[in-house]
Amino acid sequence: MKDLVRNAGLSDAFLIESAATSSEEIWGGRGNPVYPPARAKLREHGIDPGGKRARRTTREDYAKYDYLIGMDRANIRNMERMYGGDPEGKITQLLDYAGRIGQEVADPWYTGDFDATWDDVQEGCMALLQDIRKKHRL
């Protein structure tokens, strides 16, 4: 998403961060770096994930962000639980923006298919950006 926003010349209008809904990638108080096969896929597309470390979302994130995007239903359930609900309707599933209502992003942890995940995330992020640009006249 950051790459799409930067390429659209809109970086100053966005604050984009990634956060986990579980603590699996947080060890000893410090998050793991980007998983090597995911890092390779990003680099294949000209994106440098260097310095990125996993962090867990917090209740404060609900107030901080306008959009809280989950990749799958488990993310959505976890966010609703962690944030104490979704009174402002900020929590959505990424592929809903691409018209694939209720479909989950392919999880490469289970499938090993980083190409399918890239395609899903790219499609969802492009549609999300288009939706935001239309709603906020950017």
Image (tube, grey):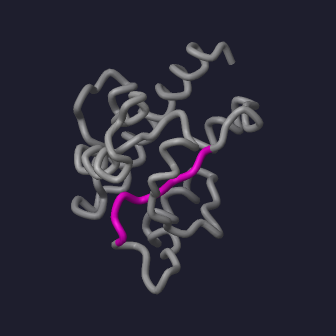
In the picture, the quarter occupied by the N terminus is top right
Left/right of residue 33 with respect to residue 48 in the rendered view: left
Which segment is the magenta one? 16-23
Query: Residue 41 at what x, y percent from top left?
Result: 48, 58
Q: Residue at x 77, y 36 (%)?
A: 12
| Above-or-below relation of 53 to 90 | below
Q: Residue at x 43, y 82 (%)?
A: 27
In the picture, the quarter occupied by the C terminus is top right
| Res 57 quadrant in image | bottom left
Look at the image and say whether residue 21 sits in the magenta stretch.
yes
Look at the image and say whether residue 14 sits in the magenta stretch.
no
Query: Residue 7 at what x, y percent from top left?
Result: 70, 35
Query: Residue 62 at what x, y percent from top left?
Result: 48, 44
Q: Residue at x 73, y 38 (%)?
A: 11
| Above-or-below relation of 85 to 38 | above
Dominant SS of magenta comes to loop
| Res 52 quadrant in image | bottom right
| Res 93 quadrant in image | top left
| Above-or-below relation of 118 to 57 | above
Residue found at the very far bottom of the displayed protein: 28
Query: Residue 66 at what x, y percent from top left?
Result: 54, 33
Q: Residue at x 58, y 43 (%)?
A: 64
